[in-house]
Image: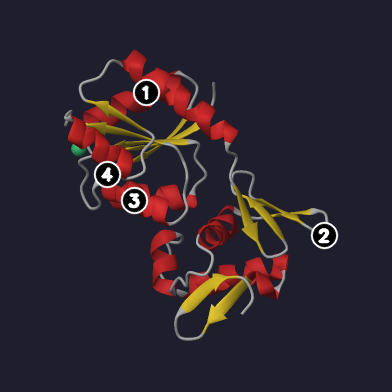
Amino acid sequence: MTGRILLVEDDADLIGMLDRVLTDEGYAVTRAGDGHTGLHLALTRSVDAMIVDRGLPAVDGLDLIARLRSRGVGTPILVLSARSSTEDRVEGLDAGAEDYLTKPFELSELLARVRALLRRHLDHAVQLAVPGGSLDLAGRTVRRHAGGTVELSEREAALLGLLAARPGVVFSRAELLDLVFDDAESESVADTYVHYCRRKLGRGVISTVRGLGYRLGAT
Ligand code: CA
């Protein structure tokens, strides 16, 4: 089975080992060593499953999952945790994780659980409604209701995907810089990519909310 997996784990030995094992199994692995980086990558890359350590610096694992779910990101997540009580498992599942594995674990069990997560994901290919069509986040294309598809760059898809996952929510340029363009130096990069999206999909795809930021759809 193939798939793209985002690993969020601050233990350098463990993340290195998991990366090797998952790569050997044929998965494409992306690594994040803290919760903030994990959040950013999860919001801007298309991945098929995530493995998230519970105790993370910057943003705690469960907080990370809750933030993703509140932004409409449904990527299946397996939580790794040193805590094994029923209460801890319930907290993890309540935060929006699909599965919970206690450290230390057997690699064969981890791999079996990852396969189960990926099977679940394949049943729910992510399609997000956008004005005039639907966005396939993984394929970075918009299928227009009127017919035809429009291809998006990785950043255009990430921006539109974030807005489409939370229709009605206004994102400030600072939030967009943080969540989509965190390697850029200026907030004006958000304006640039809004412009690109409008040029490809029409002005009504993203509206400007004066003094606040941007949101999906026409005003
Ligand atoms: Ca940890």
Q: Nearer the viewer, mark 1 or mark 2?
A: 2
Q: Position of residue 114 (x, y in %)?
A: 42, 25
**Residues at marks 2 and 3 touching, judged by CB atoms closer than 8 Å:** no
Residue 20's tag is 1
Q: How far, Cα to Cα, is label 1 from label 2?
A: 45 Å
Quadrant in the picture for the N terminus? top right
Say which amino acid is labelled 1: Arg
Residue visible at 28% across and 15% down in the picture = 106
Left or right of 133 in this view: 96: left
Q: Along the line of sight, which residue is nearer the eye, 103 or 26?
A: 103
Q: Which residue is mark 2?
A: 146
| Residue at 58% over, 33% down | 123
In x, y percent, where is residue 173?
A: 44, 73
Please report the residue visible at 20 percent of the width from the left and 30 percent of the height from the top.
86
Q: Position of residue 28 (x, y in %)?
A: 48, 31
**Residue that numbered label 3 is attached to:** 66
Q: Are marks 1 and 4 in contact (CB under 8 Å)?
A: no
Above or below 90: residue 194: below
Relative to 189, does residue 151 appear above or below in the rendering?
Answer: above
